[in-house]
Amino acid sequence: MKNVFQITTVLFLLVQTIGYSQTESTTSTPTKQDTVLQKESSKTETDTKKFIGTYLLEEANFTLEILAENDKMYIVTSFSKDLLVIKNETTLREPTRGVDLELIKDDKNALKYTQNGYVTTIKRVKSN
């Protein structure tokens, strides 16, 4: 009987863990850093139209789109649509994944893409 109870407990925990790991989180809780960035973005005037377009991350053969809806900026991929906040005059930040998108001074058709120490240039493939 003791073994049956142990096996049942282990199976219950396994099923619960698998079920929890498969649930999709539709909202993210804002962190203190997000709040600070949102406050900074309200102070900073940036021409966000310069960011709008579809870009290609060549290393991963991955496209992403930056668009504006209802006075907010979003980064849209095949699997998500995330809010962008203004970090400074030349940079947008997607705080959930830690992605920074920075304008390149002399190149209107590319952005500097930074995520967790990885830095590359993404090329604009289509302007919107």
Image: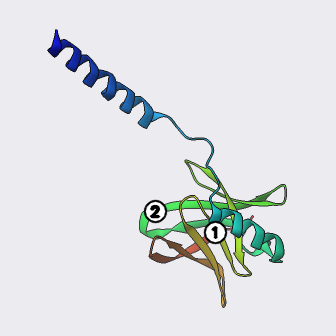
Q: Nearer the viewer, mark 2 or mark 1?
A: 1
**Badge 2 is on which residue?**
61
Display colour scheme:
rainbow
Residue 9, position as x, y percentages in the image: 28, 21
The amino acid on which the numbered mark 1 sits, given as a three-letter code, is Arg
Figure quadrant of the N terminus: top left
Residue 49, position as x, y percentages in the image: 79, 71
Residue 61, position as x, y percentages in the image: 46, 62
Specify few, some or many for label 1: CA neighbours under 10 Å numbering under 14, 14-19, or 20 or more: many
Give the alpha-carbon distance from disc 2 to disc 1, as whole Å. 21 Å
Mark 1, secondary structure of its residue: strand
Q: Residue furthest top?
A: 1
Q: Nearer the viewer, residue 75 or 6?
A: 6
**Badge 1 is on which residue?**
93
| Residue 95 shows in the view | yes
Residue 114 vertical position relative to residue 26 in the rendered view, above or below: below
Residue 14, position as x, y percentages in the image: 31, 28
| Residue 127 shows in the view | no
